[in-house]
DNA sequence: ATCATATAAGTGAGTAATCACTCAATTGCA
DNA sequence: TGCAATTGAGTGATTACTCACTTATATGAT
């Protein structure tokens, strides 16, 4: 890794850690610089503004996660197998870089409006899988967004609990339960 | 309502709306004052700081919701009935004051650490109900926090989607599905 | 009722502090 | 020597909060 790239990566990692610990607005450029062991001005050689730094971090993960989920579910045929693949992939990403994952999780509401329409979107991947399964008659037809929200919520809320410290250890440990639970939600029939 | 109480309520409502629309850190005291049609200084007759205003709004709803959920589930005997009661109560609160509800939902991570240990907590109400049902053998035993997170996530993520505008209309419309789905999650058995 | 007085509510210009960002000067590597 | 990388004091803008003052309301005596 070149020196410049190393510096840029250090800025990103320092910012990420602070953003998760204290929030984006509450983190100062001076703090980021200190945590990265560089001068404040150096940040601006690599990023035009603090906001863009925060947005870049979010978008890169957002896109990469969407593509990973999309790849993961593609080979599977049945919904049940697709769920296993998606849940597994999601847990792996969470466990591989928890700080980045937590950042993405906690700051969706501030960045989601700035995501360009054509960018790959984790939520849409799941949504499409569910829509397809409904069309194929694998699960009961209902409001797709409702079903997607409920299924995603199973895993996402558990991840949120981990952020709050109610869990220790990786998410992957529970992948089996998450997949079972998500499936159970999608398979719910009208009473 | 006295004049002073009316003013205080106007400040709270103005702050709430702005906090939801633009975030707490991004909302200035000047904006709050303008939205409430009062002078900036007047805010400080009723609140010692912007942070306390934000925290008060959060805590009041947090406590009240916890107590409402606790009351709602008490009369029910079986878990299934308790779930119906909790989901129904939750949806009602969301639909009754959506702005306050969205504020609470979106700012959990910034305020949850400041909640005193002895305050009633919506999450704990649900957790206790689930723990009880596991002890009674109504549902399979497993990590209570995991089960609680997954069940809560079903409803909470749908509410989050509504914040993002993926839903229109009230949450209550879907209370039946939420309850069915939460139950399905809790009833999941080891494969 | 009228007025005098006391208290409460509201005002908004001013202040001190913070913070994102700039840039002229410096460093150190090829 | 030349150039990219880095530095950090400085800058202008923003913002939460203060406070001396004004206005509104309540009280009570005549």
Image (cartoon, coloured by chain):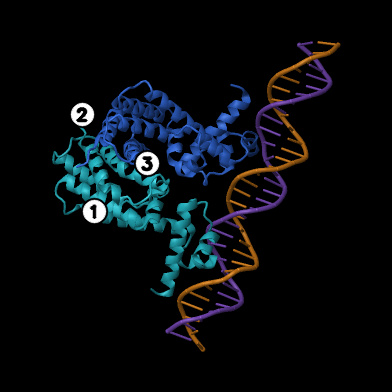
Chain colours: A cyan, B blue, C purple, D orange
Residue at image coords 27%, 36%: B185
**Label 3, residues with CA under 10 Å away: few <14, some 14-19, many ≥20:** some
How many marks are shown on the rendered structure?
Answer: 3
1 or 3: mark nearer the eye: 1
Q: Does the rendering let one see residue A24?
A: no
* CA distance separating discs 3 and 2: 27 Å
Residue that label 3 marks: B164
- Residue A138 in the image: above or below residue B70: below
Of the pair B34 and B186, the residue shown nearer to us: B186
* Image location (x, y in percent) of residue B170: 35, 30
Residue that label 2 marks: A190
- Residue D21 in the image: above or below residue B4: below
Residue at image coords 54%, 57%: A28
* Image location (x, y in percent) of residue A134: 17, 39
* Image location (x, y in percent) of residue B158: 33, 37
Q: Please report, as a chain letter, where disc 3 is located.
A: B
**Label 2, residues with CA under 10 Å away: few <14, some 14-19, many ≥20:** few
Q: Which disc, if any, is residue A70?
A: 1
Circle 3/circle 2 CB separation < 8 Å: no
């Amino acid at each position: 890794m070149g020196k410049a790239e190393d510096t840029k990566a250090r800025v990103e990692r320092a910012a990420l850690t602070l953003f998760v610990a204290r929030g984006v607005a509450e983190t100062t450029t001076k703090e980021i610089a200190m945590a990265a062991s560089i001068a404040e001005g150096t940040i601006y050689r690599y990023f035009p503004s603090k906001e863009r730094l925060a947005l870049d971090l979010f978008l890169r993960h957002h896109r990469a996660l969407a593509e990973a989920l999309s790849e993961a579910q593609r080979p599977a045929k049945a919904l049940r197998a697709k769920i296993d693949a998606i849940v597994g992939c999601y847990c792996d990403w969470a466990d591989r870089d928890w700080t980045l994952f937590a950042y993405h999780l906690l700051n969706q509401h501030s960045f989601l409006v700035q995501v360009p329409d054509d960018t790959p979107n984790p939520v849409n991947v799941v949504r499409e899988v569910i829509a397809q399964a409904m069309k194929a008659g694998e699960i009961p037809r209902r409001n797709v967004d409702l079903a997607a929200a409920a299924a995603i919520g199973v895993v996402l809320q558990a991840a949120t609990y981990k952020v709050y410290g109610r869990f220790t250890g990786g998410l992957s440990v529970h992948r089996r339960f998450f997949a079972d639970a998500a499936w159970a939600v999608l398979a719910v029939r009208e009473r």
